[in-house]
Amino acid sequence: MKTGISITAWYKFTPLEEGTLSSLQKELQTFGKAKRMRGLVLLAEEGVNGTVCGLASAIQEWKQLMQKHFGEIVFKDSFAEEYVFPRWFVKVRPEVVALKNTDIRPSEEHHHLSPEEWHDALEEDVVVLDTRNDYETEIGMFAKAVDLEMQSFKDFPWAVQKAEIPKDKKVLLYCTGGIRCEKALLEMEKQGYTNVYQLQGGILAYLRKFPHQKFDGECFVFDHRVSVDQELRPSQKYKLCPHCGDPGNCAVSCLRCGRDRIICTECHKKTHLQTCSKDCTYHLQRRSDANFSIQKH
Ligand SMILES: [Zn+2]
Ligand SMILES: [Zn+2]
């Protein structure tokens, strides 16, 4: 495996004093800048969450710094040939993963299954819920999973109610790296579910141990790679659609300028979006306004 740039993702729920957040932000901002790192780190009173990239030596030092501040952490590593983020940010937010509910505050690892335990548990009589958004589930899911078809994680409480799963049913939750499930699980317990477990380290941890097994497709990630394949390599298949930002793999020659581009399946269904960019769509529509007003009806 070529290892030009190391990427690591992690989170830790641990109470941070409001007063210390801005000095911590400054320290991390300065450290990452000096080490020429790129990525996004979120700090909140509930803890820390981030994905960052850089040279292997910088990432090594970064991990030590994180553990010095936040204690033991499980890092999910992958690699790319180039930087996968354009810039370096450390931000303070109300939550490190937004369920829009600061009452739900995970503290310790709760009902976690290791990738091995998860792999076995999938064989049991269980309901498997994907807690990610629809543009993520579209390109890869566990074979047995129910897609809650959420556009945002904030929809989770409502999506669970709608799913009408018996309260004592064994439920398995997963997401990309585990952080969303920490909150999803507590939300389910709040709703009265008594038998809920989550995949520790998420899909990224599962694929490291079990490539080409019970997870189908690719795993969406929130950076330039768009997604990673079964061996955690940057996707060769998907690009972000220039029209809607979702991952896509439909090749088009722009109907206005002729440039080749990858767009998503949904946008591909609409003739005026079979272009390389929003700009070309705008001009294409102006050029043939009459035709498109007929198509709309
Ligand atoms: Zn699209
Ligand atoms: Zn074009």
Image (cartoon, helix red, strand yellow):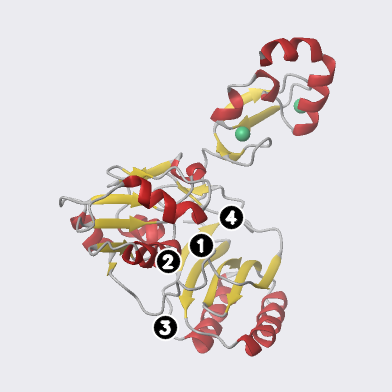
Q: Which mark is residue 144?
A: none
Q: Residues within 10 Å of mark 1 (few under 14, many from 20)?
A: some
Q: Which mark is residue 81?
A: 4
Q: Give the mark nearer the N terminus: 1 vs 4.
A: 4
Dot 2: what SS? helix
Label pair 2/1, CB-CB below 8 angstroms? yes
**Residue type (three-letter) at the residue carrying disc 1:** Leu
| Residue assigned mark 2 | 183
Q: Position of residue 101 (x, y in %)?
A: 51, 67
Q: Quadrant of the C terminus?
A: top right
- Between 44 and 138, which is closer to the camera in this rendering? 44
Q: Position of residue 247 (x, y in %)?
A: 56, 40
Q: Residues within 10 Å of mark 2 (few under 14, many from 20)?
A: many
**Mark 1 vs mark 3, CA separation in Å:** 24 Å
**Mark 1 vs mark 4, CA separation in Å:** 34 Å
Q: Which mark is residue 99?
A: 1
Q: How many marks?
A: 4
Dot 3: what SS? loop
Query: Does the numbered disc 1 mark a residue whose Cβ is under 8 Å from ligand 1?
Result: no
Residue drawn at x 63%, y 42% is 245
**Mark 4 vs mark 3, CA separation in Å:** 28 Å
Dot 1: what SS? loop
Q: Is residue 232 left or right of residue 170?
A: right
